[in-house]
Amino acid sequence: MSTMNTLKPAVDKEVGASRDTVVPAHEERPESAVIEEAKTVGKPFSDDPKFKLRNVEVFYGQDRAIKNISLDIARNEVIAFIGPSGCGKSTFLRCLNRMNDSIDICRVRGSLLLDDQNIYDSKRDVVELRARVGMVFQKPNPFPKSIYDNVAYGPRIHGLANRKSDLDDIVENSLRKAGLWDEAKDRLDATATGMSGGQQQRLCIARAIAISPEVILMDEPCSALDPIATAKVEELIAEMSESYTIVIVTHSMQQAARVSHRTAYFHLGHLVEVNETNKVFTAPEHELTESYITGRFG
Ligand SMILES: Nc1ncnc2c1ncn2[C@@H]1O[C@H](COP(=O)(O)OP(=O)(O)OP(=O)(O)O)[C@@H](O)[C@H]1O
């Protein structure tokens, strides 16, 4: 790709040498070569991992969408996945609660552990996994049911409440945590699809929270929302980070900078760099990260 020809050589932290000692800076290099030369730079590992992901590869048929990625996601951290369109952010995210299982041609390889247990164990109960690792999607997708029933759905299915009053408490607490109680409390029986887009997305967050997940995956949760609704969801992410591990895919670098503790930069299926968010946006270690955050591509 032509963008690569203008990039200055970066220091390869893995080998402690400037990569232009391997390939002279003036020489044209294919983009893939620049990535293949280096492993993930920065701090991909953690002392207290919730997820321990090693040598993860994902294939769609013959196409390798995720290329040998190793990463820890720490307990109660907010980590943002950023990178150009098609770089594999959503594919990697969906491995964390096996959402890719529904895609016939998709195969996942490598070691993916949640609290040291294999996510892809053939004996694993996927329903239980997804209760622990909830998901909020790009487009709000409430059920065509009442506000109350949307939030009560998961607890009912998982048998989390024996009495109506317990269920009422779960619904109220979940709506409160999602910052929606004041707007919803007088119309719990109204249909959820009549809410604004921002309210619907917070309802989807309340629905995810209602089954007491440990992790919440968010795949571009604000891309369909206006700036005010986006700000509310971002506030919510900050509050929720006290109780949950949160992984958010976002196209907005400002959003990643506002909400996350660490940021992971993906490129063509590789995990190029992971670092504290502040570092990624002020002093990226890898030339590809720098090119992306300075808008040279993406
Ligand atoms: N269901 C699928 N079948 C085949 N290929 C797929 C499928 N989903 C994704 N891919 C391919 O896998 C690669 C990674 O896609 P993915 O959606 O994970 O990227 P992304 O970084 O999340 O992109 P975007 O930011 O545009 O959402 C792309 O080449 C894409 O075309």
Image: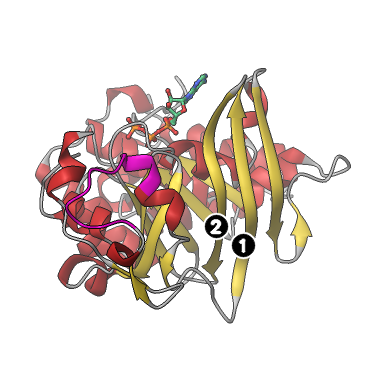
Residue 223 versus residue 251: which sits nearer the camera?
A: 251
Amino acid residing under circle 1: Phe
In which quarter of the view is residue 157 placed?
top right
**Other-residue count near label 1 (Cα within 10 Å), few / some / many at <14 / 14–19 / ≥20:** many
Tell me which label, 2 or 1, sits earlier in the chain. 1
Q: What colouring style does the render use?
A: secondary structure
Quarter the N terminus occupies: top left
The residue wearing badge 2 is: 215
Residue 247 versus residue 139: which sits nearer the camera?
A: 247
Asked if the stretch drawn in magenta spans residue 25, the answer is yes
Q: Determine contact: label 2, label 1, CB under 8 Å.
A: yes
Locate ligand 1 by image quadrant.
top left
The residue wearing badge 1 is: 51
Q: Is mark 2 within 8 Å of ligand 1?
A: no
In which quarter of the view is residue 9 placed?
bottom left
**Other-residue count near label 2 (Cα within 10 Å), few / some / many at <14 / 14–19 / ≥20:** many
Picture layout, residue 121 above or below residue 256: above
Asked if the stretch drawn in magenta spans residue 28, the answer is yes
| Residue 12 location (% of width, % of height) | 36, 69
Q: Residue furthest bottom?
A: 47
Left or right: where does residue 75 sit relative to residue 122?
left
Left or right: where does residue 2 sit relative to residue 240?
left
| Residue 234 location (% of width, % of height) | 25, 56
> What residue is at 49 percent from the left and 53 percent from the top?
216
Point out which mark residue 104 bears: none
SS state under label 1 = strand
Q: Residue furthest right?
A: 123
Picture layout, residue 39 above or below residue 165: below
- Type of secondary structure dominating the magenta stretch: loop
Provide the residue span drawn in magenta: 23-33
